[in-house]
């Protein structure tokens, strides 16, 4: 029997998409031997302020970035394209699972998101539908995990050695909470799924040296007023077609 395809789901605003996103995508694909990785732009993210660019324009930029990337494993997903509703990850994963029942999904998030999972909708159920890949983020550490989040994350850690980085008090509280919840339907479904939380190290997935926020600040300025170094930063961070698209349409100005 053929093993099910391993599929990555990499959500974000991609406002704009930059080389850091693509470098991360490639690192995750390599580490987990993924067959495909979908970039999943969100039309209306629940946890972000109003986006600078509309969904359709961000999709244009992603298509341009993928054209430059020349990697058929990288694809674009439209699962969260409806701008009339807020898209919650648990609903997206449930829908993907229903539409692709014979795949093994890997959902990608940052450590900053993991530490605030208690603000997400039904966060304890994410593991039912996918392996969770957690990317390193500067100044965000697993040791800062709240007990109420740790309760449904620590039992599913792929690398049990990481448990030693969690303060003993947090582990004790998390174990009590998990013991109370482990006979619930959600907990049973999570255990039966066989999915795990996979935390990548900085060595496995080096952070990119500039953020979308910093790029938007540079792009808001007239290029004639930028220093040579600032222009080089944009050229390094944005793929050629993405940078050309932004300049031709005057995006972020």
Image: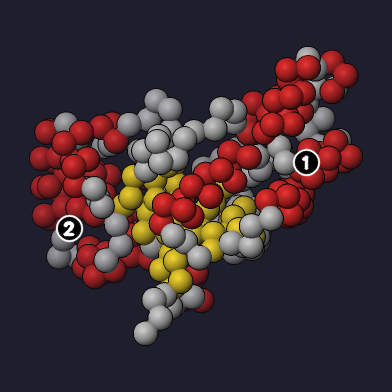
Left or right: residue 117 compared with residue 50: left
Find residue 245 and report its image quarter.
Answer: top right
Q: Secondary structure at mark 2?
A: helix
Question: In x, y percent, where is residue 145?
Answer: 28, 36
Q: Which residue is mark 1?
A: 240
Question: In x, y percent, where is residue 65?
Answer: 71, 49
Whether residues under marks 1 and 2 lie with C-beta atoms below 8 angstroms apart, the answer is: no
**Spatial distance from mark 1 to mark 2, Cα to Cα?**
50 Å
Instruction: Point out the tag, 1 or 2, that comes first from the N-terminus.
Output: 2
Q: Residues within 10 Å of mark 2 (few under 14, many from 20)?
A: some
The C terminus lies in which quarter of the figure? top right
Left or right: residue 6 compared with residue 159: right
Q: Residues within 10 Å of mark 1 (few under 14, many from 20)?
A: some
| Residue at 73% across, 17% down | 229
Find residue 78 and report its image quarter.
Answer: bottom right
Q: Which residue is mark 2?
A: 181
Question: In x, y percent, where is residue 152?
Answer: 24, 52
């Amino acid at each position: 029997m053929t093993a099910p395809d391993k599929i990555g789901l990499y959500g974000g605003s991609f406002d704009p998409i930059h080389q850091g996103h693509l470098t991360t995508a490639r690192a995750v694909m390599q580490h987990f031997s993924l067959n495909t990785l979908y970039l999943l732009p969100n039309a209306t993210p629940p946890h972000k302020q109003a986006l600078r660019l509309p969904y359709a324009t961000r999709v244009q930029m992603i298509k341009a970035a993928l054209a430059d990337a020349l990697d058929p494993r990288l694809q674009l997903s439209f699962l969260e394209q409806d701008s009339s509703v807020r898209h919650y990850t648990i609903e997206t994963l449930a829908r993907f699972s229903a539409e692709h029942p014979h795949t093994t999904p890997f959902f990608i998030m940052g450590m900053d998101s993991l530490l605030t999972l208690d603000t997400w909708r039904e966060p304890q159920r994410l593991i039912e539908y996918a392996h969770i890949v957690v990317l390193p983020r500067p100044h965000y550490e697993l040791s800062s995990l709240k007990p109420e989040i740790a309760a449904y994350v620590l039992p599913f850690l792929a690398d049990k050695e990481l448990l030693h980085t969690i303060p003993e008090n947090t582990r004790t509280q998390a174990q009590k909470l998990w013991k109370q919840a482990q006979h619930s339907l959600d907990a049973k479904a999570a255990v039966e799924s066989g999915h795990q939380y996979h935390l990548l190290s900085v060595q496995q997935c080096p952070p990119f040296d500039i953020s979308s926020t910093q790029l938007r600040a540079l792009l808001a300025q007239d290029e004639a007023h930028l220093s040579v170094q600032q222009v080089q930063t944009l050229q390094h961070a944005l793929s050629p077609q993405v940078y050309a698209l932004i300049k031709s349409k005057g995006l972020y100005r």
